Image (cartoon, rainbow, N blue to C red):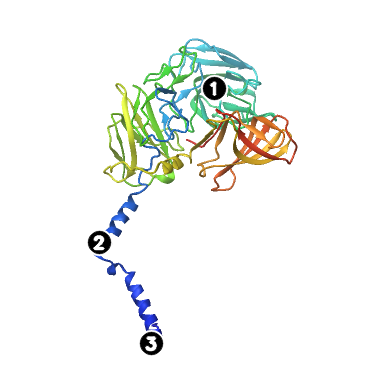
Amino acid sequence: MTDPAPSTMEEWIRAKNKEDAYTARQPSALPAAASALVAANGALLAARNRNKLNNGSFRVNQRGIATAVVLLPGRYGFDRWKASGHENLITNPSAETNTTGLSTNACTLTRVNTWASTGSWSYQLALSGANSFIHFGGDVGGGLNGFIPGRTYTASMTLRLTAPLTGAQQPGLERGITLHTNTGAGYVITASTPVPNVAGVTRTSFTFTIPQNANQAFIRFYAGHAAGTAWMDDLMVTETTFLTPYFDGSTGGGAIWQGTAHASISQSQASTTLTFTTAPQGQLVTISDGGGLLQVIERADVQAEASVFSWAGTATGRTFTHDAAGYAAPPALAASPITFTPGGLTDRIVEVRAVGGSRTFGLAQFELGSVPTPFERILLADDLRACQRFFVRFVHVTGADSAPLGSGMQTSTTASAIMVPLPTPMRIRPFVVMTVCHVSDRVVHTTLVTLINSVRGGLVGAASVGLDLGHASAGAQHRPALLILPAPGSAISFDSEF
């Protein structure tokens, strides 16, 4: 269908102007120089955000680490980068020298060398009651036993049976691992899937998250039968979401004890010391011999296409993944760049290590393609915002005035509901750590926060988080409440890192 022919000169002029405007918008009407500019800008726009890594030049440092910081395995330093390796929190995991640190219930415990999964010795349990188990550290009334509220852990053991266990049993707890937590309303027990009650050797594991408001947490390694004999070895608790191969400080491969052998926490590798000279545009960091750094990239940002991981410096690196099926052994370390094709079905890990001496590392980039491009430099504000999807820290740095952080309402004289705005929506509901935070009604009362009762995620996609806080008696129910950082050094952090 075409427009009707103009019937007057005025209509003809309007039609002509409309036609000229349409023609001017077509690419063929653009001068050659303008067409080249559009093409060049299009290429630049297509190349933006090509780096899947955050903080590749180590400009963002919300935790405020200083040069020569020593990071234990799994601890974060610069935003998004954590030290390689893991810790085994069980201090005497394989009975190699004694049974120190281990307690029993409804069983007789001995260490024997007639069977062992690792080393030469294991724990043998002669059962005498249905509630039969062993445990390390505290139990009922024993505090958090090194667990951090909000964090996720995996406990594991190797269980051997030479015949089915018999007699009365502890329903749901038998032949496995249990977590016991208390938030002030009594103990809540969760348990692993029971190992089959048949002769054989089985490695079993249990992944769990400590509640944000827990004041007690401990685990037990259960036999859970009144009669029979069970053997346990390779006891391990790591701060991971997946099962790793068993290690202690004597298993080799770089693993060490943090203190006395078979009586202290062990590490799968040496701690990582980072040295650096801060520069506004970013800098290389020097990693101590035996140390390493890694970053986890979300699955949503990992395409099943040819990719390349590149960096500046002398460190060697690799990229790999862990999936729901458990641990996948990492490939060998190599120099930059490394080309690969991800499956696109899981989060992706990139890691660099210092082997044979200290090594340097920086300008890290993970991008599509098979040839690395120059390091993508983005605005510092964009770098910070990307990191704050995973970790946000507010800290009072100077001045006598208190720093307001969030507002809400006192739900009772000893509790308040506070909504805290965040710079960007976080990856998952964060766990929260406070250092000397107060709740104030801004009238008469200001009181120290003593407990984080719960953390609420707020609206989907909202850049905010809700906190249900416990505090000393203050004000009155339904009075407005303000969360404040009262003095220099006061801080609160929101953590949704891997």
At a point 49% along the width and 33% down the height, the residue shown is 241
Q: How far apart are labels 3 and 1 at the CA level?
A: 104 Å
Q: Amino acid at mark 2?
A: Ala
Q: For the residue labelled by badge 1, is the local secondary structure a helix, a strand or a loop?
A: loop
| 5 to 317, vertically: above or below | below
Q: Position of residue 225 (x, y in %)?
A: 62, 23
Q: Nearer the N terminus, badge 2 or badge 3?
A: 3
Helix, strand or loop status at disc 3: helix
Q: Which residue is mark 3?
A: 9
Distance between mark 1 and mark 2 Cα atoms: 84 Å
Residue type beneath disc 3: Met
Residue 298 is drawn in which quadrant?
top left
Position of the N terminus by quadrant = bottom left
| Residue 69 coordinates in the image, percent (x, y) | 42, 23
Mark 1 belongs to which amino acid? Ala
Q: Residue furthest front?
A: 400
Q: Quadrant of residue 340?
A: top left
Residue located beneath label 2 in the image: 33
Nearer to the camera, 255 or 378: 378
Q: Is the residue marked by circle 2 packed among few (<14), some (14-19), or many (20+) residues within 10 Å? A: few
Residue at 54% from the left image edge and 48% from the top image edge: 461
Q: Nearer the viewer, residue 301 or 12?
A: 12
Residue 163, which numbered label? 1
Q: Is residue 301 visible?
A: yes
Q: CA distance from mark 2 to mark 3?
A: 36 Å
Tell me where residue 3 appears, x and y as whole percent. Answer: 40, 83
